[in-house]
Image (cartoon, rainbow, N blue to C red):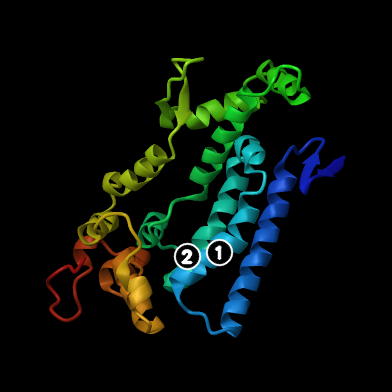
Amino acid sequence: DEFKYLGILMHGTKGLSPAIEYLCKAAKRAMFGLQRRCQQLSIHDPVLKCKLFDTLVKPILCYCCEVWSVLGSKTALASMDRIQIGFLKILLGVQVHTKTLHVLAEFGRYPLHITWQSQAAKYLQRFESLATDRILKHAFIADSKLPKKLSWQANLAGQLHDFLVAAPSEDNPQRQIFSTRSACSAHAAQLQSDPSSKTGVYNEIKMGYDCEPYIHDCCNRHLRRILAQFRTGSHWRNVETGRHQGIARESRTCPMCNHRIVN
């Protein structure tokens, strides 16, 4: 029922779901090991920890993503993406329910699915350039004849549709390729289009889409956590705590002046 090939689990009825679960568990073990080792070596710089995450954990989260990220279920893929988000929230010291858009923007980072789509697009280009006598090319052609729901090419085309840009060549003037820059720009634009009041306040203090200076300049973890909580809306003020208590926004007044709402 189950077969492992090059570290990827394939199941007769579950498809690639076991592969995603296996990589998810492996990435969590690597992340916990990273945190433990940083604690032992007294490494507290969030930017350095992010670089270590990209070196030690992200390769696991992206291993063979050209295949499973295209055919995997949305639930399984979301669980993979949450590993990075959870790691960043721990670095900032914010609450679990803090908006993902804000956390990623504080570090100037992007969701993992953009990396997955970029690598899958490069994989597709490799398929297209293969010689016709290759077995892999025959498998690629056979995949195109499968029903849309099962076809790797059809599913990938649907994912990349909004981020394709013209890249004409001598052989194919109408050729299009995936633009990572367009995908990143679309993600950053979600901050501006988010209608929530919390994001509206965040947009007033967020300039550009780069890692905020206080993250690497502030050596005091307690002060850094307070800044992060204030900026991302994961704080202790009435406008935030009242939301969890079901209090109407107009009633979440400042306890000091009792007549003004503090965003």
Quadrant of the rendered image containing residue 167: top left
Query: Gap in Å between the C-alphas at discs 2 and 1?
Result: 10 Å
Q: Which residue is mark 1?
A: 53
Q: Residue 140: x percent and y percent?
A: 69, 23
Residue in the picture at 57% in, 82% down: 39
Q: Residue furthest right?
A: 1
Quarter of the image where the C terminus is located: bottom left
Identify the residue position indicated by label 2 in the image: 88
Disc 1 packing (10 Å; few <14; some 14–19; many ≥20) = many
Q: Is residue 242 visible?
A: no
> In this rendering, would 88 be left or right of 246?
right
Q: Secondary structure at mark 1?
A: helix
Q: Which mark is residue 111?
A: none
Residue positioned 51% across, 15% down in the render = 171
Q: Secondary structure at mark 2?
A: helix
Q: Is residue 197 visible?
A: yes
Above or below for 254 versus 18: below
Q: Earlier in the sequence, mark 2 or mark 1?
A: 1
Q: Is residue 44 above or below residue 58?
A: below
Q: Residue lying at the far front in this picture: please name it.
A: 170
